[in-house]
Image (cartoon, grey):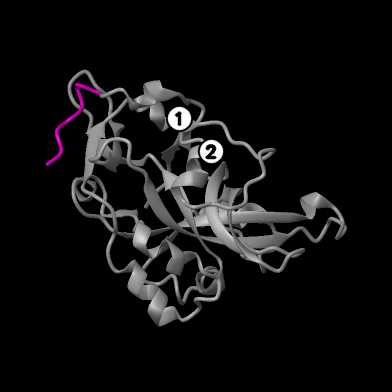
Amino acid sequence: MCGRYVSTTGPQDLTTLFGVTRWDPAETLAPSWNTAPTDPVWAVLERVDRSSGELSRQLRPLRWGLVPSWAKDPGAGARMINARAETVHEKPAFRKAFATRRCLLPADGYYEWIAVPAAEGRKAYKQPYFIAPADSGSLLAMAGLYEFWRDPTRPDDDPLAWLTTTTIITTQARDDAGRVHDRMPLTIGQDDFDAWLDPDHTDPAELRTLLQTAAGGHLIARPVSTAVNSVRNNGPQLLEEAPDAPPLT
């Protein structure tokens, strides 16, 4: 699974990297070294503009944790931060979004944990590892889905009546990631951005061909500060290497 990640690239750079044509400068997010479920996150998606009728590639902040349109309340999102690539096309919570509402979620890297048993003079704890492209400075374009949920307690003209949420698609882990956890975010290669984001591309079989392997370069994992374990902590110090962490096997 992917339950925490790093997202520090600013919107100006993201619009260039992902060919975004529409972004509202009033929508801003602070860099985060500890992005957690229910946090707002940057998403790249394609939607038809209601006024012009033209398809545009947009950069928008969405809430992490997908809330299906039929959910009774938004609390369901906290349990739907990930969708498995093997079943995303058939699960009721994800299949409609998989058909027409796909997105990319940019990340510097993500965290996974290994349980370290108690030892003499030390309690058991969870050691976090930061997993990122070996090519320093590269981003992961994580495959995501997004969904709209309407709050039935609010009037139609209330701007807070609609909530837009997202989930990360995961796949079998590879490289160093597989030494930490058996799942990892599935990423989309740049050559497949257009096909993945196109809302008119709705054939499930064709779309699933984009989910067969994780794209991008080699991944590396390194132990980092256990301060990551608390969602209250944030900042670049979380990526400082933990020299006393147990080696990966």
Residue 92, image x, y percentages: 54, 74
Residue tagged 1: 230
> Residue at 35% of width from left, 62% of height from top?
191
Residue range corresponding to the magenta coloring: 242-249
Residue at 65%, 55% (x, y): give it.
164
Helix, strand, or loop for circle 2?
A: helix
Please indicate whether residue 47 sits to the left or right of residue 175 in the image. Answer: right
Q: Position of residue 105 (x, y in %)?
A: 47, 51
Q: Is residue 188 visible?
A: no
The main secondary structure of the magenta stretch is: loop
N-terminal label among 1 and 2: 2
Q: Nearer the viewer, residue 133 or 226?
A: 133
**Side of 117 relative to 16 (left or right):** left
Q: Nearest to the eye among marks 1 and 2: give it.
A: 2
Q: How many marks?
A: 2
Residue 196 appears in the picture as rendered:
yes
Question: Mark 1 is on which residue type?
Answer: Ser
Query: Dot 2 corresponds to which residue?
Result: 12
Is residue 64 within the magenta segment? no
Q: Name the amino acid type tagged 2.
A: Gln
